[in-house]
Amino acid sequence: MLASSRASSSTGPGSPSSTLIIPRRAEDWEPWKSVIRDLYITQNVILKDVMAIMEEKHNLRATPKMYKNQLARWRFFKYAIKPRPRGKAEREAAAAEAAAAGDDMSLVTSSSRSPSQSTDGLISPLFHESRQTRSVQIGLTAVRDFLNRLIRVDPTAKQDMVVVGYQDPCFRFFTASMELFGQGENNEGGLFLRRAFIQIESLVSNMTVKGFSDVCFTIPHLLIECDRLDILAVYLRYLSELALRANNQPVREVAASLTDLLDDADAMIRFVMTLTKANSDTIAAHTDAKSLERTRKWAYNQYVACQRTSMRGTTAGEGRHNHRMLRVESQSVYWAQHVVMASPESDALAELWMRRAFPDDFAPRTEALLAMVRDLGAKGLLPPPYDRMMECLYIGWLSDYYETVEDWPKVFEWVRRGLDVSAGEQYQVWSIHIEGLMRKHGSSAEADELRSRRLSHEFLEEVRQQVENMTLSLDGK
C-alpha cells in the first residue's frame, strides 16, 4: 500500500521502512534534497538511474515529470545558467566582465580546451534566466541522457561511430538544398530538401551517436545559418513526430527546446553550439571506453566546426570564407587521419585546416600528402574507396586554403580536380559552391558550363527517382 505524502515528513533518507513514499508537495521532497543533489549533480548520475536508486534504497517513488519539476525548483541543473542582470548598472557591469573575459556569447568554458581536458560533461552556456530557461536545460539534459544511455547499454555504441557517419549523406543533402535555394534554383533545391527529409527517417529509426548529432545539432545549425527559420520550423515538427513514433524521448526534447527559441535566432544558434559542446564533453567523460577515442575527437571537432562556421555574431568581413563544407568534412577528418593515413603530418595539417590557421607552407605540405595518397593507390596499398576519399579530403583542404587567401585561379584549379574524383552528393555540393564563386571571381561562362554538367549529372536523376518512389511516412497525417 502506498503511503500518503504526509509520510514523507516523518520518513527520511535511510529509513528502514519498506513503505513507498510519493512526494506530492514541494516540502515532501526536502528530506531527500541532499541525497538527490549528491547523485544527480556531484556523481553525475542520469535521472533514470537516480529514480531507480531513490526507490530501491530510500523508498521514494515519483514520475520523471515530478522529478524534473522538483529539480527545477531546487535549481539542480547539470548546466549552470547565468542570471540575467536586472538593473542598468548590473547590466553594464556584466557586459564589462564579459568583454574582459573575451566572451563570445557562446560558452563560459574555453573553446581551446582539448577533449582530454573536458569539463566532464559540465558546461556553462550564457543563457539568461527567462521563460525559455527551463526548456533549454531540458534540451541539454536530453543530450547527455541519450549519450550516456546509448554508450552504457548498447555495446555497439562503444565502437567508433565516425566510420558509419562518413557514409551518411543526410547533411550534404541539406547543404546542397540550401546552396541551391541561395542561387534561386528552387526546383532543384526542393528536390534535395525532400530527399534530405526522407533520409532523416532512417536516422531517427536507427539512432547512432552520429545520427543524433546530425538531426539535433548540425542540421538545425545549417538552417539557422542560412536564415531559413521557416524550413527549420517544419523540420522540428517533423523530427518531433518521427521521434514520437520511434519512442525517442531525448530527440523530442531537443526538438521542443529548439522550437521554443524559434523567435530568437541568435539565442538558438548559441544554444546549438552549446549542445555540440555538451555532446563533446559527455562523450569525453566516458574515459573507460578506449575505443571511443576517435569518436571523442570527431565530436570535439564538430563543436569547433559549428562554432567556427557560425555567421551570426561575427564582425564585418569575418567568417566570409567559412563555407559549410568545413562542417561536412570535419565529421570524417579524424577517422581519415588515424585509420587511413596514420600520419602525424596529416594530423598536424588537419588541426590547421580545422581552425583556418594556414601557414605559408600549408599548400606544398598538403600537395605532398596528396601525391603520397595517389602513389599508395597506384600500388594497391590504399584500396577503394579510401583512395578517392583521401584525394577529395586533401583537395578540399587545398581549395579552402586558396579561398581563404583569395587566390581564385588556384581555387578553381583545385575544385575542378575535386569534381573529377568526387561523386554523388559531394559532387553536387562542390559544384554548386564553386559556381557561385566563379560568378563573383571568375568566368560566368564556365560557371554556366558547370551548372549544365551538374543538372545533367546522373546523380541528380537518381535523387529525382528516389523522391518519386519514396513517400514520407508522415505524408497525409
Image (cartoon, grey):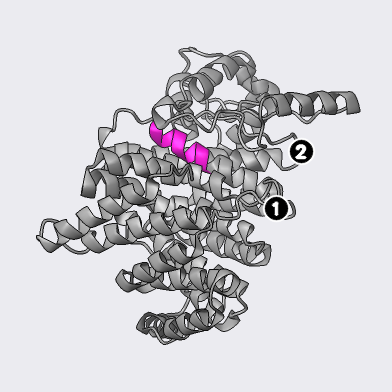
- 324 or 477, nearer to the observer: 324
Is residue 330 positioned above or below 423 on the image?
above
Residue 62 on image: x %, y %:
55, 33
Q: Residue drawn 33% across and 55% down?
A: 394
Kindly identify which numbered label has been placed on residue 130.
Answer: 2
Which residue is pictured at 50% across the width and 31% down the height? 112
Look at the magenta stretch and give its main secondary structure: helix
Q: Is residue 129 above or below residue 173?
A: above
Label 1 Cα neighbours within 10 Å, binned few <14 / some 14-19 / many ≥20:
some
Q: Tell me where residue 295 appears, x and y as whole percent.
A: 34, 42
Q: Position of residue 432 (x, y in %)?
A: 50, 72
- Lateral position of residue 54 relative to residue 210, left or right: right
Foreground residue among 49 and 391: 391
Residue at the spot x=37%, y=82% of the render? 462
Can residue 97 be spotted in the picture? yes
Instruction: Inspect the image, locate mark 1, and give the three-letter code of the amino acid beneath it.
Output: Ala
Question: Residue at 49% of width from left, 75% of height from top?
Answer: 192
Label 2 SS: loop
Quadrant the C terminus occupies:
bottom right
Badge 2 density bin: few <14, some 14–19, many ≥20, Cα 10 Å:
few
Asked whether disc 1 touches disc 2, contact meaning CB atoms under 8 Å apart, the reply is no
Range of residues picked out in magenta: 276-284
Disc 2 marks a residue whose amino acid type is Ser
Residue bearing the label numbered 1: 265
Q: Quadrant of residue 421?
A: bottom left
Disc on the earlier residue, 1 or 2: 2
Quick check: can you spot residue 150? no
Dot 1 lies on which element?
Answer: helix
Q: Let me know if residue 405 is in the magenta part.
A: no
- The dot on residue 297 is none
Q: Is residue 266 left or right of residue 120?
A: right
